[in-house]
Image (cartoon, rainbow, N blue to C red):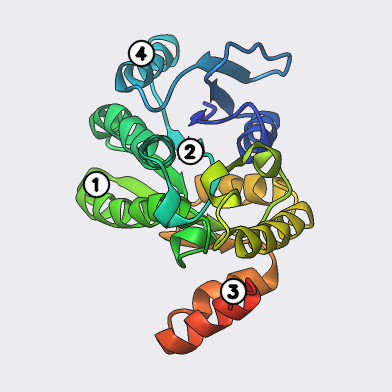
Amino acid sequence: MPNVILITGASSGIGKSCAEYLAKKGNLVYGTSRKELKSNQKNLVFLQMDVTNRESVEKGIRLIIEEQGKIDVVVNNAGMGILGALELATEKEIRLQIDTNFYGVVNVCSAATPYFRKQKSGKIINISSVGGVMGLPYQGFYSASKFAIEGYSEALSLELHQFNIRVVIIEPGDFNTGFTGNRIISEATMNDNDYKTSAETALRLIEKEELNGCHPNKIAKLIDKIIRKRKPKFRYPVGKFEQVLSIYAKRFLPARLYNNILRSYYKIP
């Protein structure tokens, strides 16, 4: 029988590529979007779901169970980014970033896990980021949300192992997706004389790297391999060689040296 897969944030970018690729591989994919969408592709169905609303998430997963009788894989991909100085972030911006990127993952995992436990099987694949390994300047709350996913996933992996449920983290570097164009820019930061120049320099660098990043199908192929593995690894960095290397480098370099490298890279005085 084909795997039944739920992918959040499947209307664009990494989620869209993963949903389409995995559907073509013969899996039955349910992709979520906050807006109502229709699919013309075989094996791909769209669900209207708001990952920040637990009731919406539970309703969507119940629908999958009612239609298919099971769920095999959850891919938590839904996310968004805000660029701005941490000091100037508004409460609304902070909540939007954390609610979408972190609480969205928690809501989906909490809703899917009871069915996985009943089946005594399942895979949870959480999309983290290189920003979940290192604090990125002017993307501080994005990094905070991804760091939270890392810690949450580590604990969840330990708790669910006894039920034959595998938890996996994917840590992408820069990928060429709609994420770049959808990033929210902090007005307060861009109007602040102390932060404006530095933030604009960082933004240009960030956007350049993203637009020259890898194709999201690279992640789709990785997820396909993870799904087919009986015992996948817990953590999978993915992206350009130098970005993957930077993840491993943090484990071995002195903190001061690593911070100096990041500050130099982002051209922060």
Q: Amino acid at mark 1?
A: Leu
> Which residue sits at x=33%, y=52%?
153
How many C-alpha atoms fall within 10 Å of the one at disc 2: few (<14), some, or many (≥20)?
A: many
Cβ atoms under marks 1 and 4 closer than 8 Å: no
> What distance separates the C-alpha of mark 1 from that of mark 4?
23 Å
Cβ atoms under marks 2 and 4 closer than 8 Å: no
Q: Mark 2, mark 3: which one is toward the viewer?
A: 3
Q: Which residue is mark 1?
A: 160
Asked if residue 81 can be seen in this view, the reply is no
Cβ atoms under marks 2 and 3 closer than 8 Å: no
Who is closer to the viewer here, 236 or 264? 264
Mark with earlier residue (3, 4):
4
How many C-alpha atoms fall within 10 Å of the one at disc 1: few (<14), some, or many (≥20)?
A: some
Q: Which residue is mark 2?
A: 75
> Which residue sits at x=63%, y=20%?
44
Mark with earlier residue (2, 4):
4
> What distance separates the C-alpha of mark 2 from that of mark 1?
16 Å
Residue 103 appears in which quarter of the rendering? top left
Where is the C terminus found, in terms of image quarters? bottom right
Q: Which residue is mark 3?
A: 268
> Which residue sits at x=57%, y=47%?
223
Look at the numbered disc 3 and give the secondary structure of its residue. loop
Q: Amino acid at mark 3?
A: Ile
Mark with earlier residue (2, 1):
2
Who is closer to the viewer here, 18 or 33? 33
Q: Mark 2, mark 1: which one is toward the viewer?
A: 2
| Percent of width and height locating residue 94 | 39, 42
Mark with earlier residue (1, 4):
4
Residue 59 has which mark? 4
